[in-house]
Image (tube, rainbow, N blue to C red):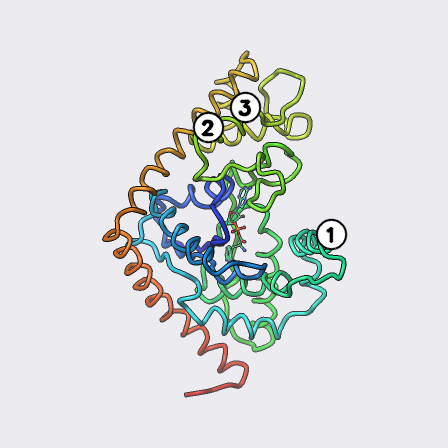
Amino acid sequence: MKRILTGIQSTNNLTLGNYLGAIKPLIDIKDELYLFIADLHSITVPFNPDELRENRINTALLYKSMGLDFEKNKIFFQSCVPEHNQLNYVLLCHSNLGELQRMTQFKDKSSKFSQENKTLTIPTGILVYPILMAADILLYKPDIVHVGKDQKQHIELTRNLAERMNKKYKKELFKIPEHSFNKVGSKILDLQNPEIKMSKSNENKKGTIFILDSEGDIRKKIMSAKTDSLDNVKYDEENQPGVSNLLTIYSSIKNISITDAEKHFIGKKYGDFKREVADTVVSELKKIQDVFYELKNNKVEKEKLMKQLKKNADECKKIASETIKAVYEAIGMNNE
Ligand code: TYM
């Protein structure tokens, strides 16, 4: 049995990209799974405490609604295990500015801030956040980190930091994790601009499907998704990125290969193709939404879930504190 780990921010409503890229493949997984709600990552950009409070709970309820088992898997709030921050600081002191400034996500996010704000107040959080991510991972010595393709560079940084520390302290302080992506769906693209990934922070919200979007909105977004003038439902990332993205969404939900999805749509007009993709997304998300709203209104179930999250965090804390103890000892801070 392998140990798999992943985390998802609780910044806002989850997207179809988060679901297909990171969560769906982990539902019913047989391996040992560590999955945390990365609330500390959600404060790397300006935030509102009331929204954060609400989003943390909603994220947990959504995980449950998607079918993740909170008893079998270690699902918890990142901030409930303070060791994430302890290791974060030690790793930060073993990193350098250049490697953080090279991160593509930092460049993207900071460029958005510089456009908005001529005085260039770039939050430090977005620069140092890959280090916290490395701490999240290395604390638990996972075999595999499961993420979407956009996180590849951060996993490489994690591996570099782990190797650097192991070498410097001549000890296997950390396991060097492998990373895994889905065969299909590891990069769901924006429906309006299939050059970029679907994301909650994309400016044009018509290109992003949120898990809690209404049926009407989902249909509208898919029916107006950018395609091309070839009127041929074919997977061709270069010449038909919009159509390829819809085929990816369809086959990820249906759990079929892209080739089978292509066969299914042979000879179909784009209008019919989009309608069927929309039906598929609506039916998948409706199942999740129904459970979500039922849970949200059920105080007893909600409390039960919160208790389980706390229990899971306590178990994770035990493992995390072992790692911190070994790291502190190695760097010369023996406190016991
Ligand atoms: P976040 O919250 O931006 O995204 C959560 C997960 O969803 C995947 N994802 C996508 N996959 C396919 N298509 C998309 N359009 C798409 N958009 C997002 C992401 O790749 C990710 O797997 N820093 C991380 C959270 C994190 C983490 C970690 C992940 C914190 N610590 C430790 C793994 C291990 C983040 O911001 O992901």
Percent from the top left, x then y, of residue 260? 48, 23
Considering the numbered disc 2 on the image, is that residue within a helix, a strand or a loop? helix
Q: Which residue is mark 1?
A: 115
User: Callout 2: 10 Å neighbours few (<14), some, many (20+)?
Assistant: few
**Label 2 within 8 A of ligand 1 by Cβ:** no
Q: Is residue 60 above or below residue 273?
A: below
Circle count: 3
**In this rendering, position of residue 106 left or right of residue 223:** right
User: Callout 1: 10 Å neighbours few (<14), some, many (20+)?
Assistant: few
**Label 3 within 8 A of ligand 1 by Cβ:** no
Q: Is residue 128 above or below residue 240?
A: below
Residue at 37% of width from left, 65% of height from top?
A: 316
Q: Which residue is mark 3?
A: 223
Q: Nearer the viewer, mark 1 or mark 3?
A: 1
Specify the amino acid type for callout 3. Met
Considering the numbered disc 1 on the image, is that residue within a helix, a strand or a loop? helix
Q: Which residue is mark 2?
A: 216
User: Callout 3: 10 Å neighbours few (<14), some, many (20+)?
Assistant: many
Residue 123 visible from this viewpoint: yes
